[in-house]
Amino acid sequence: MGTSKREVSIRKIYQKLYSSLGPQGWWPAKTRLEVIIGAILVQNTNWNNTKKAIENLRLHRLLSLKELRAIDQKNISFLIRSSGYFRMKAKRLKNFVDFLFKEFDGSLNAMARRETGELREKLLSINGVGPETADSILLYAFKKPVFVVDTYTERIFSRHGFFKEKISYQVLQDLFLKNLIADVDVFNEYHALIVYVGKTFCKARNPLCEKCPLRSFSHAI
């Protein structure tokens, strides 16, 4: 079977971004649990606000499953205020911890051993965990070959003509899964590069197209 034009385009964008921007070193965390906490707290906010919340949890020695299970939700809310929607996010953190102890006896290692599709379904069953959060946990915490998409992905690839109208998470994710070899390291870097370009150049308003690494990129689908 021959290589599709879309597959070539998807790969070329990755190669261009990687050669221009280099490795991103994402996700910045010391443990699996930190990745998971970050994936939940970063919803609807930026990473700097999330980082402040995580550091506050660290300062109070709460970056452990035992302590998160024991602490009152209200106290978590107070400590993660910088992440925004802090009461809702505190509840979601508690939901995840409750799920982990119920389903896997509190073991992230046991969780990691589950098949990707099954684990994704279980994550999505947790109140407050959507596709992007679930896939971030799968890719960055458990090294599963799942491609994470977000608003930056939609913005960049719509502006480059890969689709014309609003697109669902699953359809957008399939665009990458079907046109890339399943490789955790590539999926990690690609998503991180997309986030960087979306934040720095391909902004919702006043995009800096003339400075973007993809300014001269053209593709044929």
Image (cartoon, grey):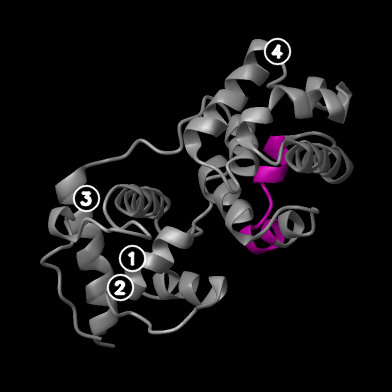
| Category of crowding for the residue at label 1, using alpha-carbon neighbours closer than 10 angstroms: few (below 14), some (14–19), many (at least 20) | many
Lower position in the chain sequence, tag 3 or tag 1: 3
- In the picture as drawn, the residue positioned furthest to the front comes out as 206
Residue 50 lies in quadrant = top right
The amino acid marked with disc number 4 is Arg
Numbered mark located on residue 110 in the image: none
Q: Earlier in the sequence, mark 1 or mark 4?
A: 4
Q: CA distance from mark 4 to mark 2?
A: 44 Å
* Disc 1/disc 2 C-alpha distance (Å): 5 Å
Inter-mark Cα distance, 3 to 1: 16 Å
Point 60% across, 30% down: residue: 34
Q: How would you rate the neighbour count of disc 3 (Cα within 10 Å): few for under 14, some for 14-19, many for 20 or more? A: some
Where is mark 1, residue-wise? 156
**For the point 49% across and 59% down, which residue is it?**
150
Q: Secondary structure at mark 1?
A: helix
Across and down, in percent, residue 189 comes to: 34, 48
Q: Measured from the top left, where is residue 114 in percent x and y?
A: 69, 52
Task: State the separation of the CA atoms marked 1 and 4.
Answer: 39 Å
Quarter of the picture containing the N terminus is: bottom left
Residue 125's spot in the image, x, y percent? 79, 59
Looking at the image, is mark 4 or mark 2 nearer the viewer?
A: 2
Q: Are marks 4 and 2 in contact (CB under 8 Å)?
A: no
Q: Which corner quadrant of the image does residue 183 belong to? A: bottom left
Residue 126 as seen in the image, left or right of residue 190:
right
Task: From the image, tell me which residue sits under label 4.
Answer: 61
Q: Which residue is mark 2?
A: 159
Say above or below: 179 vs 40.
below
Query: Element under label 3?
Result: helix
Residue position marked by numbered label 3 in the rendering: 18
Whether residues under marks 1 and 2 lie with C-beta atoms below 8 angstroms apart, the answer is yes
